[in-house]
Image: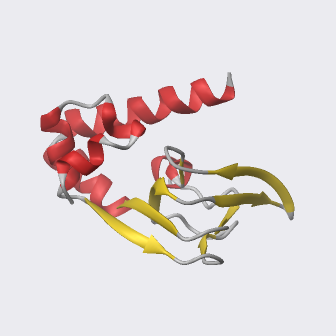
Amino acid sequence: MDEKRLRSAPLFAELGKKERKALATRTDRIDIPEGKELATEGDFAYEFFVITKGTCEVVHDGEHLADLGPGDFFGEIGILSSERRTASVTATSPMEVIVMTEQALRSLHHEDPEVARRLEQTIQQRLTANRG
């Protein structure tokens, strides 16, 4: 993935160029069709997603929790805390997402722990701001 594309995503925009370059080798851009389930509540988490285009809905115990769109991200709780998915997420339109696997995050921790720490810190800050 191109470092410049990562810069366009709010989650990665505050990271430095060196940090985005380290992430670029560990992330992929994928297209998702409308109706595709990206995360299933109760399943183990293996990746997290950053939405660059399109929308999706978040459902927990059959109850609609949120609609997400460009700039939003999901799946981070499962891979950061090695837990099962807390909700199901389904595309409500065609989407483009940036995806990072748990394995890629572990690799980043091993090879460049400072970048991994900055990414996790940025995720935590965004989560806190969104709850506020």
Asked which quadrant contains residue 58, the reply is bottom right
Q: Please indicate, yes or no, whether residue 110 appears anywhere in the rendered image.
A: no
Residue drawn at the location 56% of the way across and 67% of the way down: 44
Q: Is residue 92 above or below residue 108?
A: below
Asked whether residue 131 is in view, the answer is yes
State left or right for residue 119 relative to residue 47. Answer: left
In the figure, is residue 106 to the left or right of 52? left
Q: Is residue 63 above or below residue 117?
A: below
* Rendered residue at 43%/72% (across/down): 31
- The picture places residue 98, in percent across and down from the top left corner, at 38, 58
Quadrant assignment for the N terminus: bottom left
Pinpoint residue 33: horizontal percent, then vertical percent. Answer: 54, 78
Q: Position of residue 11 (x, y in %)?
A: 41, 38
Q: Is residue 98 above or below residue 124?
A: below
Give the colouring mode of the picture: secondary structure
Residue drawn at x 55%, y 48% as measured from the top left: 77
Residue 70 in percent (x, y) is at 51, 49
Q: Nearer the viewer, residue 47 or 106?
A: 47
Q: Where's the C terminus, which quadrant?
A: top right
**Where is 84 relative to 37, above or below?**
above
What number of labels is visible? 0
Residue situated in front as seen by the camera: 118 or 9: 9
Question: Residue at horizontal 18%, vertical 55%?
Answer: 2
